Amino acid sequence: MTNSLRLRLLLWLLLPMTVYVVAAGLIARDNAQRTASLLQDEALLSSARVMAGDIRWENGYLHAEISPSAIEILSSPYGDEVYFSIREVGGATIAGTSDFPLRVPGDTPLWYDATVSGHPIRAVSLIRPMYDSGATKQVVVSVGRTLMQRDAAATELWRPQMLHFAGIVTIAVVLVCVGLTFELQPLMRLAKDMLARAPNASLRVHTDPLRNELRPIVTAFNQCLDIIERKTAMQRRFIADAAHQLRTPLTLLGTQLQYARRQDDLGQLKETLLAMHRSNQSLVALTNQLLLLAQAEAADYADFEGAPVDLRAVATGTLEQLALLAQRRRVELSAHLDEPVQVLGNEPLLSVLLFNLLDNAIRYTSAGGHVALTVNAQDGRVVLTITDEGPGISPGLRDRVFEPFFRASGEEGSGLGLSIVREIARAHRAEVVLGDGTGGVGLTASVVFPAVRG
């Protein structure tokens, strides 16, 4: 099937019009044939009546002298043959063609199709009673004519109508082509304008010069462009921030390497190598965080369908991983976990989400503080809550902390933890909510997952 809009619209117009013209043509031809047949039948009846008036009694016998007017009524410029027959019912032929097929009508004239001398004809028969000396005889007068004039008359009646229909179709096609050419000009100008734009120029399309039917399409196109531009801007900012974040540890590592090469003292060299090892660990951790963020941003919702994960088991494993860190920082960890609670998702990514939230809570909580983890089901949804006793986050910054590399305080870190949490939550159709901690102290981070449908 063609992809041309002009051709497709023409087909939508021509197909129903063709069906209509064919149907109308057949009806017109039938009407033309009926009209031509009716005219011929009337002429045949007039001729038969004239012939019936020419029958006379002479000396006790029936005699007919056919007047020229009876034949002239059926005269044809197409060379039609005229046949007639006048005969008594059950008797001999009085005048005319003896092999004319006899049809005895009733009280009214009878029209019929027949064949005489191998020629198809249209004929009419009528009865004329003849009275003489108390005797009555029934005389059948039959007149027929070949079909050339009738067929020609039908064609002459039918052809102008078909030409009229063909003219309508032709005019409609021309008007559609011309109309589409004019109506598509704004789109063609729009395409040329977009192709002529500079690579860095905005691609948004103005809807003012477009028809109402095209504006929703262009509006949707502009919305898609907005999303692409936002994603592109985020990507550029992320690349710039990542380059800036990587440049510092790489520069430090290079400086330490230069310093180590100039050291002759073994003790100084060991201290420098230890510092290089810590710098390398920071660089590896930052790189892993960047990879996790990229993986979370690229996650497809479809990947999580039909993969139930026990969130309580994930929370237990994460607590075991961070127990040593909490012990070193003298932070108390507590957990309240309901019976096995399942969500649909990816277990490794959910482990990263919970690890980042708990790691942030432990690092921002002062020594002697408390971090609580709760997993339960509320109103058909699964809620994961982590509450700490740290400095908290002011309401004005709670949206910005999810941006990559943003830090709400001077605490050591990459600034990617909450960005990763947000992307993983989005991939699981979950929502991350930040609020005040217990008694207004610290921070509460809640992740609300949709319920698992059975």
Image (cartoon, rainbow, N blue to C red):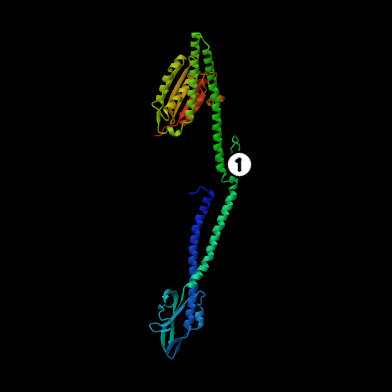
Number of marks: 1
Circle 1: residue type: Asp
Residue 34, image x, y percentages: 48, 69
The residue depicted at 45 percent of the width and 16 percent of the height is 325
**Nearer to us in this view, 312 or 7:** 7
Residue 152, image x, y percentages: 50, 70
Q: Quadrant of the C terminus?
A: top left
Q: Is residue 352 visible?
A: yes
Residue 430, image x, y percentages: 47, 30
Residue 118 is drawn in which quadrant?
bottom left
Horizontally, is 94 left or right of 237 in the view?
A: left
Is 236 rendered above or below residue 389? Answer: below
Residue ID for mark 1: 193
Residue 363, image x, y percentages: 49, 18
The residue furthest left is 90
The residue depicted at 51 percent of the width and 81 percent of the height is 69
Secondary structure at numbered mark 1: helix
